[in-house]
Image (cartoon, rainbow, N blue to C red):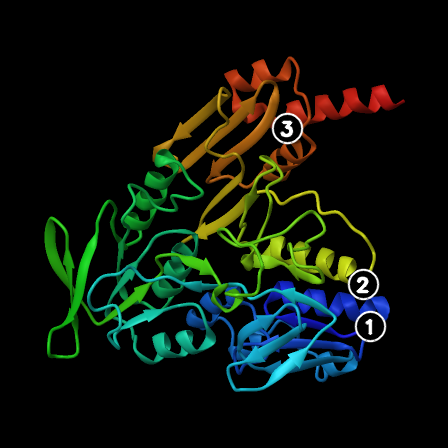
Amino acid sequence: MSYVVVGAGPAGVIAAETLSRLGHGGNITLVSGEPEAPYSRMAIPYLLAEDIQEDGTHLRHGKGHYDDLGIKVVHERVASIDSKGKSLAFESGGSLGYDKLLLATGATPVRPPIPGMDLDGVKSCWTLEDARQIIANSKPGDNVVLMGAGFIGCIILEALVARKVNLTVIEMADRMVARMMDKTGGDIIADWCENQGVKVMISTRVNGVSENGDGTYKLELEGKDSINADLVVCATGVKSNMEFLEGSGIETDMGVLINEHMETNVPDIYAAGDVAAGFDFMTDKHDVHAIQPTASEHGRCAARNMAGDRTAYRGSLVMNTLNTLGLISTSYGLWDGAEGGDESISVDKERSKYLRLNFKDDVLVGTLALGMTQHVGVMRGLIQTKTPLGKWKDVLMEDPHQIMSAYLACAQDASRRIG
């Protein structure tokens, strides 16, 4: 049996390792589309901040790790899949057959369709090569513009601040981290950044980037004065890597559609990680949850199913934790609320603290927390167990900070029922 895993990020590496530990070493090929050793994109900001060296981004550090597990790593980019003939065609011209195939190709940055995004001074921050380019083209005191203040953008923001540049952040949405924070939370994060010397421009659209002729760049802003920069870093979103699937018969939407066994609609082809649209634990609908914990769980579950151990994946939970210049923010589940549900809010903007609990009936279904790290595990646990809160919901509606008391009381009630 020949197992092929396309993609050498966390989902792909964990899947290959799991297949090996299930006894399939020697029949596993891990296809990496980059010339590097398999690495974590989440480690790239630490490289930019000079907290680690390049090898610190590697997912595995043991010499001969993949060889020892019987995993053959090949550095090729897949051009197409022949699902009937069970083979991959590489951009280099070669091909590779398979019996079982896992698609773990991740995502790729998306740049807005505006003039100048292809200029040399406009960089993404997604690959190790991108990081090398940013390091080579930025030094302390340079004027740097970061386009995009989403989750990835805010991680890059912290790394750029560590490089001691003069940073301006431009975000088209009406708040920072719009996909994990409501307006109140996003504004608190923006104020925090401003207080630490970062200029933040929300609700701002870049209409174009051009060269000034002196090695700097000009950004034209809609309805606002243009600004100059020595370097522009673009972090305006990503999309799942699916172009090579054209003609394969594999069904896609925002990602490759999979069932609870990580299977696509095509027999013997599976998907995992940022390319996979799996089930959302809270909604039972398909969605792409582009976070490393989900990628890791996907990879492990997909490998078991590929090896014949039918294992159902119950769905991934939206969960994000972000450290923005020392301000910790988290969001879990339906953080923006459930239709017809209730919410309980506590906000202290002066202290950069915010807590929001969202309920459906008497069940906690989503949370936001800023400036607090205590009890976030409890909140996640209540969401994942869908624990009925009973009378404690009324307590939390009055004071969301009573979440630990509610958790302990509900746990004791459950224990008594079991006993």
x, y (%) of residue 58? 59, 74
Q: Residue at x 61, y 37 (%)?
A: 284
- Pointer 1 and pointer 2: residues touching (CB < 8 Å)? yes
Of marks 2 and 3, the one in the foreground: 2
Residue furthest to the bottom: 93
Query: Residue 347 bears which disc, if any?
Result: none
Amino acid type shown at disc 2:
Ala
Q: Residue at x 49, y 19 (%)?
A: 340
Q: Residues within 10 Å of mark 3 (few under 14, many from 20)?
A: some
- Identify the residue under disc 1: 24
- Identify the residue under disc 2: 307
- 107 or 262: nearer the eye? 262
- Identify the residue under disc 3: 404
x, y (%) of residue 190? 32, 45
- 231 or 350: nearer the eye? 231
Q: CA distance from mark 3 to mark 1?
A: 45 Å
Q: Residue at x 64, y 28 (%)?
A: 404
Amino acid type shown at disc 3:
Met
Of marks 3 and 1, the one in the foreground: 1
Helix, strand, or loop for circle 2? loop
Q: Residues within 10 Å of mark 1 (few under 14, many from 20)?
A: some
Residue furthest to the right: 419
Helix, strand, or loop for circle 3? helix
Q: Residues within 10 Å of mark 2 (few under 14, many from 20)?
A: some
